[in-house]
Amino acid sequence: MNTPALKDWPLWEVFVRSKQGLEHKHCGSLHAADAAQALHMARDVYTRRQEGVSIWVVPSVAITASNPDDKGELFDPAADKIYRHPTFYEIPEEVGHM
Amino acid sequence: MYTQAMDIPDDSGKKLAAVSNATSEQEAAFEARIDADGRIEPQDWMPEAYRKTLVRQISQHAHSEIVGMLPEGNWISRAPSLKRKAILIAKVQDEGGHGLYLYSAAETLGTSRDQMLEGLHSGKAKYSSIFNYPTLNWADVGVIGWLVDGAAIMNQVPLCRCSYGPYARAMVRVCKEESFHQRQGYEALLVMMKGTDEQRAMVQDAVNRYWWKCLAMFGPPDADSPHSAQGMRWGIKRISNDDLRQKFIDATVPQAKVLGVTLPDPDLKWNEARGHYDYGQIDWAEFWNTVEGNGPCNKERLATRVKAHNDGQWVRDAAQAYARKQKERALKEAA
């Protein structure tokens, strides 16, 4: 009970492709000594009910994330560019689906 | 999967100190998001008390999953058939998985796996008190699935809408798997009820022993839950202890009838005016006594858990030594 548990096992992020043709999607994280062990554990922890056909594991430290404080700066400029959406344009009814 | 009494303070759990380390702007943004029923993510600013409450609740929840493997694990080697054994192994493995989802969610709040395990192993951190009762006969395994997991589902479904994103996402995954747990238990009991008088008596005995403990799983009455209001305000808790308990009772009474067992409460009867079942007094003194560590199995559960952890130390060390060696070899080859 006094020995270090998983202190030195790095954290991995797990991505699972649920079926062929779909993208890998983030589903959680886990601790593992190395990549091969991370894959094994991801299989047991995240795909016990055929949730996946393929797994990626990525060291969590390798992920660079955007800062929540920059959210406005990064994403707000897209808010007033409604002309980037097809619904901005009015097309005569008789043209049909476009 | 199991959770109870989210507002049980750990021994270490001091009063939530509302130490403000924030600008009023950050605080206002947080409150506004909560008011709009938005979600908080790990990198977002949050009040320290919100973070602490979540760390305590999620880690207690994770510990409950892990310790919850023990009472049922007792029966894996004694399951009455290969089919029941396979089902039980799958269920116990699920509980381990649920613990891992939850530990990961708690780690996003800045605590470490080591710290959480230390809390559990030293007895500082709490887990669901239901696991401090023994599983005396095979029917207990069925009753745990039906009632204990049933109570846990009541608790966990609203947590899928928790304001903290990683916790809510872990709960979605857990709830998807949980329904199997309850159904397998109920079905195992149905089979026993079609058996001999002795088997039926075993089911009734298990129900008698577990019923009141399951009602206590929802935590103290609302009037005695000082942290509940804050948890509701923050969108961590969505439905009060008493409301969840009532929901569970209303759902369970008809199931007991189909099964053919009696729920051991002479005061249990339908109240037309309330549109709910009335029920008798829960023994809160016994509940608190068990939470404080004096239940019939507290010491045994903790000792088993600590021993398993210590016995696994060489495996963790070996995995790490192997990983280090592989890395060194790769470096040498590259050089």
Image (cartoon, grey):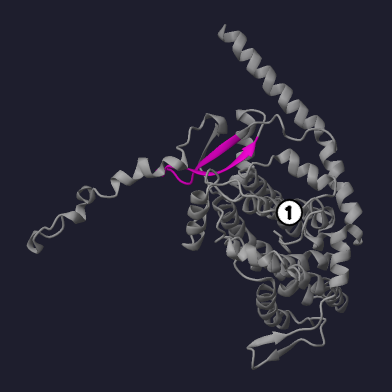
Question: Residue B238: x percent and y percent?
Answer: 59, 67
One can see residue B297 in this view: no
- How crowded is the residue under tag 1: few (<14 C-alpha within 10 Å), some, or many (20+)? many
Mark 1, residue position: B60
Q: Is residue B200 left or right of residue B56?
A: right
Q: Which residues are magenta?
A: A12-31
Q: Amino acid at mark 1?
A: Gln
Q: Is residue A21 left or right of residue B1?
A: left
Residue at (59% x, 9% y) in the render: B333
* Position of B42 relative to B245 (above/below): above
Magenta part, dominant SS: strand
Residue at the top extreme, as displayed: B335
Residue at (29% x, 49% y) in the render: A79
Q: Quadrant of the N terminus of chain B?
A: bottom right
Q: Is residue B71 left or right of residue B116?
A: right
Question: Residue A18: x percent and y percent?
Answer: 48, 46
